[in-house]
Image: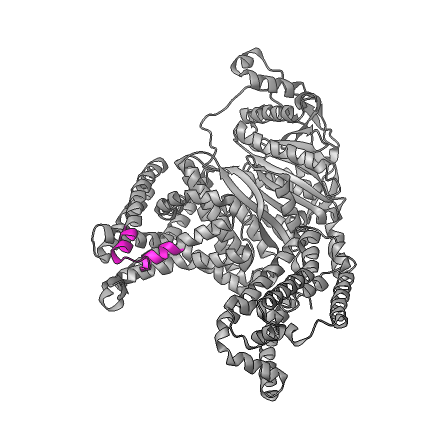
Amino acid sequence: MKKSRFSLYAFSIPTRMVTAFIVLLVFIVVDSEGQFGKVFMEMYQHFEILHILIPLVILHAGCSLLCYWFGIVGCQINCQNRCFSMPLTLITPVTVSILLSIFYIRTNENICKGNNEVTECNAVRNLVNLTNNEQIASWFCYDMCRFNLKPLGFAAYLSSSGVCWQLALILFTLYTWQTKQKRIMRTGELFLRRLHYGAFLEQSLLMSRRKDNDDYEISKTKKMNTKAKILLCATMWHETPDEMKRILQSIYRLDEHQSSNQSVYKMEAHVYFDDSFVDGRINQYVCYLLETLSEVDKENNTDRPDIMKQRMRRFITPYGMQIIFNLPFGCELFLHLKDKTLVRRKKRWSQVMYMFYLIGWKSRHHVKEREHTYLLALDGDTDFKPAALMMLLDRLQRDDTVAAACGRIHPIGNGPLVWYQKFEYAVGHWLQKSAEHVFGCVLCVPGCFSLFRASALMHRNVAGKYTANSLESKHLVQYDQGEDRWLSTLLLQHGYRLEYCAGADAYTNAPEGFSEFFNQRRRWGPSTMANLVDLLQSSPETVKRNMSISRAFVFYMHLNMVSSLLGPATVCLMLAGALSYIFKMNSGQAIIVSVIPQVLFLIICFKCKAATQIKIAGFLSVVYALLMTGTLFSVIGEMVRVKSVLTPVGLFTITVAAIFIITAILHPKEFSCLIYGLLYYLCIPSGYLVLIIYSLVNMYDTSWGTRDSGVSFTEKGSSFKLKGGRPASWSYSCCGVNFGVAHDEEEETTIPLAPIDNAIEEEVDQVQLKILKIVNNCTIENLSQREVRFWKEFVVKYLMPNELPPTQKVKMMEDLKELRNKVVLLFCMCNSLWIVATLFLQLSAAELSFDWVLNHATVKVEPLTVMFLVSFGTMQVIQFFAMIYHR
C-alpha cells in the first residue's frame, strides 16, 4: 500500500474532481426549483461576475498549494510549532474575526448614512450598486444577512458553537505541538495523507500529521536515532600549503562540532598521501602538510602544546608510514603516507585502501555498525562547514536506499578562467543536478565532497569491481580517469540511489591556468561519456534493480548524451548564424566557413604536441569570443531593425537569459554567480567546441594533467625501510573477500629513520628541516601483528605496483590510440550528419523558410535558425522546469 500510494493518489485525485463536477450538474438538474438551483441560477444571471470569481479561484488554489508546501517545509526543518501548528490553529479564528469586523463596520457605516440593515442586505443579495472590491467583501456577508443576529441568544449560540469547534480541533491536534522527528524527513513519513482539502485546508493538514507512536514513524526513528560513525577520508598528492590549510581547518571545525554533538555522531579523520617518499625519504609536500598542521593547531589551540611535539605517534606499515595525531577535542587524525615503490599510485587505489581497511578490516567484528557508518570522501583542498555534513547525513539517514549524497561545489581561485568555472558549476548544479534528482537520481557524486553509506560501498559487486585492474584501453579511460563517476555508476547499477543536496556547500580550488583547465577536462570528458555509455548499455538490468531509474529517465539520459555529442555541431550552427548576419553571407557559405577552423584544429590535434594544441586552442578561444560578441550585437541589431524582441533568435536569447536570471533568483545565496554569465556566453565555443575536440583527440593520454610538478624532488629527509618477515598464519573473511595466509613465525622488524647528515641539512630549508627532525625524533611504534598481516596480504592481492613491461606499454598505447580513433570517427560522423542535414535544408530554404511579420517588418525564419533552436533549447527548457520543481 505504501509503495503504491503515489499511484493511487495520481488516479484518485482526477477521479474525485470529475465525480464532484458530475454530482454538481446532477444537483442543478434535479433541484432546479429548489434552494440549490436558485442560488446557482442567481449566480448564472450575474454572469459578468466571473471575471472576479475566476481570479479568486486561482488565488485560492495557489495559496492552498503554498500553505501546504510551507507546512511540509516547516516540519522538515524542525520549526513545526512556529511554522505549522501555531499558524494553522490560529488562522481560522483570526480570519473569521477580521471578516466579522469588516461586516459590522460596513453595516454601521451604511446605517450612519441613513440605510437600514434590510437595504444593505438586499444590496448584498442582488449584487447591485457595488464595486468589484465591495462585491468580494459582501459575498462573505451574504449568508449572514439571512440571519437576524440581534437576538443575543442566537448570537451566543453561534459564537459558542465556533469556540467549541475550535477547542475540539485544538484538543484533537495537540500532539502536533509535541511531535519530534529528524530533519528533512519525507512527506510520507510526516503526514498520513499526501493531499490536502482546499475547503478545509488547515484542518486536513493538522489532522493528517503523524504521531510519534505511529508504527510507520517508529521503524524509521529507531534507525535515525542511532549514533552515526563518520570516517572522513581525504586524498592528497601535490597540494599547496594554502590548499592543505583549508581542509585541515575543516577537520578542526568538525572535531569541535562532534565534541558538542556526541549523541549524533563520532568521527575519525584519515588523509591518504600519494607519492610521499622519494628514494625512501619524506618529500616536500608531506613536510608542507605537517608544517601546516602545526600552524592550524596553534591557531585553534593557543594554550596547548604543539601537536607535532606532544600528540604524535608513528608506525611503519607495508604501504609506507602511518602517523596519528590527537586533535584537541578528542578526534584522531590518521596520516597514511604511501610509497609508490610499495603500493599503487593514484586516487582510486587510495580509495580502495580506505574502503577495505576502514570499513572492511577495522569493522570486521562490528558488522552491524556498518549500517550506521558513513564515509565522507574529500579532496585535499576542500573547505566545508559541519552544517553541510549534517545535511548530507540527513539525506542518508532518512532513506536506506540512498548510497551517497553530494553537496553544492563552489570553485574558488582568481582570474577569468575561475570566473568562467563559477558560472559553469552554478549552471551544472542549478539545472543538471536538479534535473537528474527530479527525473531519477544523480548520476555522479564527486569525490571532492560526498558522503557514502559504508554498507553500500562494501557490496560485493561494488567494492569487488572497483578493485578491477585496467587491462583494456577502455578501462584506463573509464576506471582511472574518472574514478568518482565509475564508483557512482557501480552503485546505480546495483540498485542504490544517489542524491543531491543543494544546501550543503563546499569549496574547492579550480584550475587557474588554461593548460591545467584543458588537461583536467581532458580527463573528465571521455570518462564521463564512457561511464554514461556503460550505464545506458546496462539500463534494462538497472531499471529492474533500481527504483530511482525508470525508462523515462533512461530516455532523458539518451537525450542528454545526444545533446552533449552534438554540442560542437550546435555551436557551429550558432557561429554560422553570426557570420551570416555580420558578413552578409548566405547561410550555406556561413556553415562551411564555420566548419573549416574545426577541421583544421582537429588535424592539428592529431599531428602536433599537446603544448602546441593548447596554444592554438587559446588563440581560437579568443577569436571565437570576439565572434560571440558580434553574435550578441547581431541579435540586438535584428531586434532594433524590426522594432520588436519577438524575433525567433531574439525570443530565444531572452528566454535563455530569463531562465538563468529566474534560476539565480531561486538560489539567492548564489545570485552573484550570474555576474559571470556574460563571460560564460563568450566562452561557449571554447567550452563546447574547442575543448571537446582537444579532449577526444587526447583521450589516449592517461596522465593526471593537474598539479603535475616539473621538479623531481630528492630531498632531504630521513629514510626508512621495513625489513624482514613474512606474515604469520591466520585467516579471516571480510567484506566478501577471503584472506588466508600461510604460517610463518618470523618476526617483523623495523629500522628507524636514519639521522639527517650535515650535507642534507645544508640543502633543506629551515621549515622542512624542522619537520624532518621532529618526525625523525618521534618514536616508532609497531602495528599489531594482525594489522600487519592484513596489509601485507591486501597489498599482494590488490595494491602491488603493476608497472607494465615496455612491450605491453607500447601495446596499450596502440590500443588507446585505436580507441581514440573510433571515438573521434563516431563523433565526427554524428556532428557531420547534423551539419550536412542543416546545410541541405538550408539549400531548400526557399521552400522550407517562412516569414515572421513584426511591426510591418518581415523576418525570414530559415532552417538554420530552427535547427539551432531545437539543438540548444530543448535540454535548457526541460532542466529549467525540473529545477523549479526541485526548488
842 in magenta: no
Q: Nearer the viewer, residue 627 or 472?
A: 627
Total residue callouts:
0
Side of 130 relative to 613 (left or right): right
**Residue 481 appears left or right of 354:** left
Q: Position of residue 62 (x, y in %)?
A: 56, 63
Query: Residue at the spot x=62%, y=63% of the render?
Result: 105
Q: Which of the two residues, 41 or 832, is positioned nearer the viewer here? A: 41
Q: Quadrant of the N terminus?
A: bottom right
Left or right relative to 307: residue 539: left
Residue 671 percent coordinates (x, y): 48, 45
Q: Position of residue 826 (x, y in %)?
A: 37, 55
Q: Residue at x 62, y 53 (%)?
A: 461
- Extreme residue toward the top, this view: 758
Q: As rendered, which of 823 and 332 lies closer to the eye?
A: 332
Q: Is residue 642 magenta?
A: yes
Residue 38, image x, y percentages: 59, 83
- Magenta segment main secondary structure: helix
Of the 4 image quadrants, the one containing the C terminus is bottom right
- Name the image colouring: one colour
Tell me which corner region of the image, top left, top right, bottom left or bottom right, holds residue 346. Answer: top right
Q: For this view, does 537 lie left or right of residue 106? A: left
* Residue range highlighted in magenta: 634-655
* Residue 303 visible in the shown view: yes
Q: Residue at x 70, y 55 (%)?
A: 86
Residue 744 visible within the image: no
Q: Is residue 752 above or below residue 801?
A: above
Please determine whether, in this image, residue 628 is positioned above or below residue 553.
above
Q: Is residue 34 above or below residue 177?
A: below
